[in-house]
Structures are given as structure tokens and as C-alpha cells.
Image: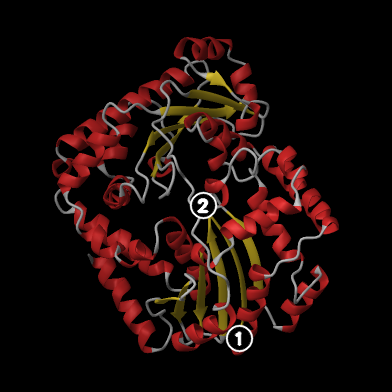
Amino acid sequence: MKRRIAIAAVLALASAIGLAAAPPAHKRLANGLEVFAVENHAVPLATVCLVFRGAASAQTPETAGLFHLYEHMLFDGNEKYPTQAAFMAALKKMGVTGWNGGTGTEYINYYVTLPSERLAEGLDFWSWAVKKPVFEPEKLKREKEVVINEIRGYHADPEEIAQNALESRLFPEHPWRKNIDGPESVVAGATIRQLEAMRDGFYIPSNAALLVGGDVKASEVFALAEKYYGDWPSAASPVFGEPPHGAFPKGVALVYPDDNYYGGVASAGFRWRGPDVLRQAKDTYASDILLFLLSSPVGRFKTALMDAGLGLYDPEYIGFGYPTARDGGNYQFAAFLLLGPDASDILERTEALREAVDAEFGLIAKDPAAYFGEAELTKAKTKLIDQNLLSEEVASLFVTGALTFWWSVAGADYYFDYEKDCQAVSWADISSLVERYFIGAGSASMVRLRADAYAASPLAAESAAELGYSEIGPDNAFWWQL
């Protein structure tokens, strides 16, 4: 509790001198657009961010990668700023200090940060971009080349190869919902008609939020939102992420010999299918609390794994995560294993580590209060809430980061009630969560190590065959290659 009190004191002092962000004010326009205003008068800047739900989670095999392409096209001109040059000139004229757009697994966002006295211009600027984009053949041709070059970079990135190799096998029914890029062929064959269909189906007010943060007044933000976005035609919200991803297939075990990986260590990772936030909301709060219970480098969980004699590198590099998701939520464990003179035993040690992790979860499910210590539940809740408080300190980062994420993935009500719902988590909830999602559920695994270390150990390949591990690389990582 000391950390929470200290942070609360800092926030109180910051509030007294006008630095802390006020809680977001919220309003929904008649056309369905949600508007959030985050007041923070520390500096005379404002950030205007528009976010849309969808992206990879709304893709089909025929549209995989087109949300990314659409993001690029939005910077290429609209009815008020018909060219990219005019678009950029408008940004410069407004004195924009930062601007960008991004496509994620479950949302797309666009933002500018500009002097707060130019707030109305910033809101007007984005209204034209999202309401009246102009798609022209030559622009589309140019942006296809840009996006395809980006895709080629992603597909050569070892991190992307590892992530996609695992997820394309964990979500075999709809793997394109986890991959932002898509195959080059889909982007190369994209048409203006497809982009218009995307505009009409997803770039609509009922599927969007306008987030404004900084040196602003909520009343002014709401009035300007009505002025510039109130005439945006309403339409039915799209349905995506249906049907949901199912349980993980059994027996997914991968080894990735990577030319560019660290020397002397291998990474071992496990995944379990977790809750989806809109379907199992209560379990997501318990999951977030569980993360903090497991995070201490001197806590029982990491200490037990370090003491298991498996050659783990360091407790600071044992990680357990649960990225909250609408569709395909999953738990992720990762650790580094030290390599000996060769890598012949690395997969056997990984399987032993999996058994050790499973054994610890069995003990947690049996009596989490005894396992962690009675006081640790309150501490974990405090750390989690402190983290949320700190995410609100810088208005521009808050609206383009935490608020964008939570609105897109879980919705405004989930975000506003988050602290209360986390506080309600009990030891019984933790026990039930572990019982249902870990005990007997089975996990997928991936081992990643330097290719030369793997190749120098003929027994490693034999071990892979015996233990059911499949070798992956850039030629069989992505869903369309399978």
C-alpha cells in the first residue's frame, strides 16, 4: 500500500499545480460517435485522436492486409485536402508537433498533437480525412508499393516470424484475424471498390471514438465534435470476431532455429487459451491480478522455477502476460534457458520447464492465498491500479495509448469500472481462473535459439522428432503458407 499512497500524494500535488489529467469526460453523439475529453492544462498542447474498431480482428482471407492499406490511403488526400502535399501543408500550417496513424490487431487510430489554440482546426482536419477520403487509382498504386515493401520487412523480421508461426497454428480456423499484414497478393490486388466498402462498413461513427486530450475544456470539445462530426451519417455497427476463436489445437510445439538470435541462451515460451474480454469479462480482471501475483522476481512462482535445476537464466527474465483481447485472448509465459556446450537437451529441458510451470499452477489453484501470502492480493491490486493511474499522466500518450486500447478492445464501461471490478477479485476467483484455464487445459510451446547452435547438435533434431516439435522458419510461418 505504501507505493499507492506515495503515488496518490504525487498525483494530489500535481493536481494542485495543474499537472494531473482529470478523468475523461464522455459523451455520445446522436450518430453514435463516442467523444472523450481528457483535460490536462500542464502545457498548451492538445491531441486529437480518432480510433476505429476492426483491423486484423475484422479481416477475412480476401481482405487480410487491407486495413493497413486503408490507413495509408487516408493520408493521401480527401475532398478538402485533395493531395498528399495539401494534406502535409495543412499539418504544417496548424503547427502540428506530432502526427501518425497505426493499424493493430483490434483497432486503427490516427492522431495529431498541435497547439491547443488550434484545436478547432485539428478537429476539422480529421473530420475531412475520415468522412470524405478520396481514393484514386494512381494514389492506390503508389500506396500498394509502400505497403508491400513494409510487409516484406515484417515478413523478414524474426520476431514477426516467431509470432506468426505460433499464432497461425493456435488459431487455425481464423488465423488472418491475428495477422495485420496479410499476404502481398491481397494488397497487390486491392481495388478502390474494396476500400469504399471498408469505408462504408467500418469508418462510420457508430464504430468510432474521438479522443481529445490536453489543454482543452470538455464543453468546448463536445461542442466542436458536434459541429464537425455531427453530420457524419450513421450506420449499423459492424460485427466482427464471430464466430470466436476456439480452443487451442493439441500438440502445438515449435522450434525456431534463428540466424539472428542471442548466443548462449534459448527462449522457451508457452501459451494457454485465455478469456475474451467481451465474453468472459470477469475472468479478465482476475487474469490481470494474476499477472502481478506472478511478477515478483523473489516470489514463490519464479523462485520455484529457478530452483528446479533447469538452467534458467535469471528470474527477471521470466515473464507471464495476458494481453486483453476481444478475440483470441491467451496467456503467455516466457523464460530464457542457458545453453550448454551444445543444444542437444534444450527441448527436453523445455518440456521439464512446462511440467514445472504446470505443477506450480496446480499448487496455486489449490490454495492461492497460502501460495502467495494473504497480503499479496491487496498488493497486486494496488500495483495494477497504480499502473492505470500512471498511464493517465501524459494526456497525449493516454489518448493515443491506454484510452485508445481500452475503448477499442473492451469499451468505455469496462474502462470506467475497471478499478472497482479489479478490487472485487477474490482468492476464490484466482483459484477458479487457474482451474479452468490452466489445469489440464494443455499448452502450446515454442523454443527459439541460434540456428548454428541447433545445427551443431544432431541430437537436437532427433529430440525434436521424438517430442513432437516442428521446425519453423520464414517459409512456413504465415497462415497463407500453410
Which of the two discs, 1 and 2, labels the residue nearer the N terminus?
A: 2
Q: Residue at x 21, y 44 (%)?
A: 430
Question: Mark 2 — residue?
Answer: 106
Front residue of 231/302: it is 231
Front position in the image: 217 or 229: 229
- The percent position of residue 95, horizontal first and vertical second, equals 70, 82
Q: Position of residue 326 (x, y in %)?
A: 42, 49
Above or below residue 97? Residue 166 is above
Answer whether residue 114 is visible to the viewer in this image.
yes
Front residue of 269 and 265: 269
Question: Quick check: marks 1 and 2 in contact, CB under 8 Å?
Answer: no
Instruction: Report the amino acid beneath label 1.
Output: Ala
Could you tell me the amino acid type at mark 2? Glu
Quadrant holding the C terminus: top right
Horizontally, residue 226 falls left or right of residue 94, namely left
Q: Name the residue rendered at 69%, 70% in the picture.
A: 132
In front of the other: 359 or 253? 253
Task: Say which quarter of the image contains residue 84.
Answer: bottom right
Spot the residue most to the right: 138
Q: Residue 143 appears in which quarter of the rendering?
A: bottom right
Residue in the image at 22% along x and 64% along y: 1
Q: Secondary structure at mark 1?
A: helix
C-alpha distance separating marks 1 and 2: 29 Å
Q: Residues within 10 Å of mark 1 (few under 14, many from 20)?
A: some
Residue 450 location (% of width, % of height): 61, 28
* Colouring convention used in this rendered image of the protein: secondary structure
Reading the image, the residue beneath label 1 is: 120
10 Å crowding of disc 2: few (<14), some (14-19), many (20+): many
Is disc 2 placed on a helix, strand or loop?
A: loop
State how many labels appear: 2
